[in-house]
Image: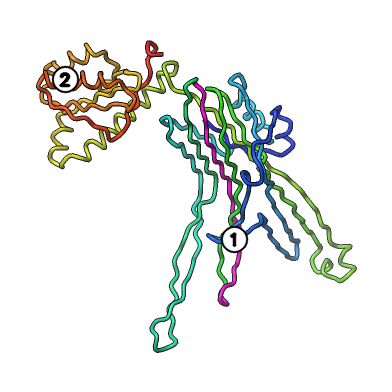
Amino acid sequence: EAYLVSVGSEIARNIGLNWSVAGNLGEGFSTTSFGSTELSSATASADADSESGGSSSVASVATGFLSSYINQDGDISALLEILETSGEASVNAQPRISVIDGEEAVFANTTQVPFATSSIRDNNSFNQNTVTSTRVDFIDVGTILRVLPRITQDGKVIMEISSEDSSFTIRDVVSNDRVTSVPEKTQNIAETTVLVNDGETIVIGGLRTSSLSDKSNKVPILGDIPILGRLFRRTEKSHSQRELLVFITPTIIDGTTQAEAFRLAEMDQKFADTLFDDKKGDVHRSVDNFFNRDVFVSVGHKGGILADGKFVKLSELRSLIQSDESNGKTIVVRSHPRSPKSITDDIIEMAMEADRKFVVDNTLTPFVPSTSTED
């Protein structure tokens, strides 16, 4: 579970986090780019002027980032709700993703911004005619969070985290005497690897965006008079800083979180069923689906057995395979790479003794929740 929160820099200092340095100039950084051409600074500016006034602004992003830990007793959602209600924070996103150990979780809340690119080529080598072709490319702008979790033997979680928050401004670029409007992309990126306890929250911060703006108001005509016009003009300067905080809380799904675990197991079986069906011919697939002829048996890394989404013992599975209900059906056996081989061998032997067709399907590693007896 994660929260991506935009707050004022003063709030970030006062919400009670014990910050420690987690990055340097090479880890937390920002870049500005025109399409795919990268520049070395992170700036954005805008100028406007009219009879009623004008404004300009400059934004920059701090380098380096910080991290902090909040134990499982901290109520993050309550804290953020209070800050958001008071207008001191804005929750940009609240993704909640379940993944298998060692698989990457990706959350993206982005917008594809189009821009036109053109190329000029000779029509032929005998004259000066040229052909200009135009194509449309896109850049992704918004929030992207990537987390790769790994569970250690002592029940902790190692997380490789990459967080990106980006925005864009339309700019005019002159190339070969042609003016093209392209999006200028500004990125805030933080990357780190942390070790946390189950249910502990890691906070990534320190990615600041500063903006300085000048707003001019003037009396029409009178404000344009040289020297004396200053009496009829007023310039207001404002400076603001915003900071992106990323709160990430990993929760290991095991026997203590059975409801969530069984939902994941059900999704896993449906996905495996779909992949298995894709290997069949159209007629074979239609007949098997109509008569429900596949019985999926999954063996977990601790030896737990799921048969069509229900926990069973070997003796119960033997009765199921030998029953008239499974007559004419295919026993699809899926085993975790670290599961006890003897259990898989026993299941195959049961199918052979009952004269049932069986298939060992290793296309997708099965997800089998741990039971309380296994823990």
Q: Which residue is drawn at 16% across and 32% down?
A: 290
Q: Residue at x 35, y 19 (%)?
A: 302
What x and y, as percent, mark residue 311?
30, 16
Residue that badge 2 annotates = 349
Residue lying at the far front of the rendered structure: 341
Residue that badge 1 annotates = 170
Q: Which residue is drawn at 45% across and 70% down?
A: 134
- 23 with respect to 222 (left or right): left
- 97 with respect to 245 (left or right): left
Per the rendered image, the range of residues in magenta is 155-178
The amino acid beneath tag 2 is Glu
Q: Residue at x 56, y 26 (%)?
A: 196
What x and y, as percent, mark residue 15?
70, 29
Q: Which of marks 1 and 2 is nearer the N terminus?
A: 1
> For this rendering, which residue is in front, 154 or 159?
154
Q: How crowded is mark 1: few (under 14 residues within 10 Å), some or many (20 or more)?
A: some
